[in-house]
Image: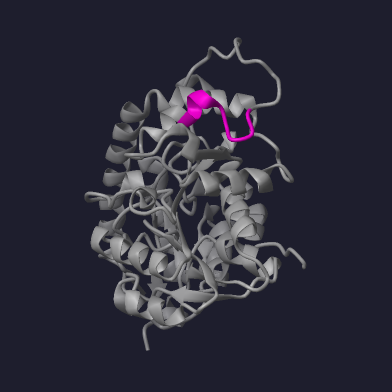
Amino acid sequence: MRFRRMPLEDWFDSYQYEVDYDIGESGVKYLNLGAISRDFAHVQLRYGHHRGSPELRSLISEQYEGLGPDQICVTTGSSEANFSVIASLVGKSDHMIVEHPNYPSLYEVPRSLELPHDLFRIIYEDRFEPDIRRLERLIKPNTKLVSLTHPNNPTGSVISEKTLREVVELVESRNAYLLHDETYRELCFGKPPPPAATLGDRAISMTTMSKAYGVPGIRIGWIAGSKEIVDSVRAVREQLTICNSVIGEAIAIAALKQRDTFLQDVRQRVQRNFVTLKNWMARQDVLEWVEPGGGVVAFPRLKNGSSTEELCRTLATKYRTFTVPGRGFEMDRHLRIGFGGEEDELKEGLKRLKQTLDEYAPLLQAQ
């Protein structure tokens, strides 16, 4: 067993802090503490509850019809949630399926733990929509877990309620579990499907406050599911972090108490930025894309099939603008553009991306 660095995070380490404009981030623009609350003098700096603060779990459970606080486990970001679910459910004799492309941790964890797995590829030609027949063909007698993410990172594709219900039914009929990463669910451009955890006893919803809420620094995520799942995740967490930061949980409580106001402001900003990005993409002749249906990221690709690695490196080092090359998601010809930040930063970043594309134009003309 060997854990390796994710190329995506290595790219962030190398370039994100060396630029003036960031149009590659996968969340909304981060907030400062004063935007949420300044009153944390009451927080006791003791160990927290292993499943998360009861008050926080109660607030979270309000988002899941039919589920109570005891069916929520708060984690140190969704990355710990992902690791804990996989480590607790999938053994060496089991098999799991992971949607691809995706945030790399979702498939790097089973690779590092040397767990049998297959990638369920969503493809450009299908508008990155999951093909349930293709998924069904990947399921084996020993498949224990299926992992999907919608709205998807990096493509922005959204699963329909009909398809999600079919996936839950399929997975449960095979006595497996579904782990559904719903990080961007609140940012669907249309009506979102219901949380997976409300559709079946073997379905698990996973999310984080890092993306839609703009507070990645507090490292708060969670899973919603059966009590059995919550207990299994807690057992793994006790070997890792034991509990969350009580300061992070206090900030999460304050933010969730203002949830409706927060999300309304965020949705308005994201919609404005999405229009800006759509208009920009309509003028490009070397890029093509599938329009995202939610979230704050898009995944355009070069029409001629070239890698975006040097393009993104030049953009960062010469034009001081951050994006993410497709290599970070094992899809070289793509790049990820984030549109969750400030409108002026997005516009200037896209302007500089266009300058870089023009510089590379002789190499990028469609064949």
Which quadrant would the N terminus be assigned to in this image? bottom right
Which residue is drawn at the image coordinates 30% and 66% (left, top)?
166
Asked whether residue 212 appears in the rendered view, the answer is yes
Query: Range of the magenta residues?
Result: 49-57
Q: Residue at x 28, y 65 (%)?
A: 163
Location of residue 316 in the rendering, given as x and y in whole percent from the top left corner: 57, 57
Q: Quadrant of the C terminus?
A: bottom left
Q: Nearer the viewer, residue 354 or 163?
A: 163
- Which percent across, then down, holds residue 339? 38, 50
Q: Is residue 335 left or right of residue 123?
A: right
**In the image, residue 202 lies in the stretch drawn in magenta:** no
Whether residue 332 is visible, yes or no, is no
Is residue 54 in the magenta section?
A: yes
Q: Position of residue 19 (x, y in %)?
A: 58, 49
State how the image is colored: one colour
Q: What residue appears at the point 56 percent right and 27 percent down from the top-left corner?
A: 53
Q: Position of residue 334 (x, y in %)?
A: 45, 71
Q: Is residue 272 above or below residue 310?
A: above
Vertical relation: 86 (above or below) 251: below
The one nearer the camera, 88 or 355, is: 88
State the image quarter where residue 161 is shown.
Answer: bottom left
Q: In the picture provided, is 258 more to the left or to the right than 69?
A: left
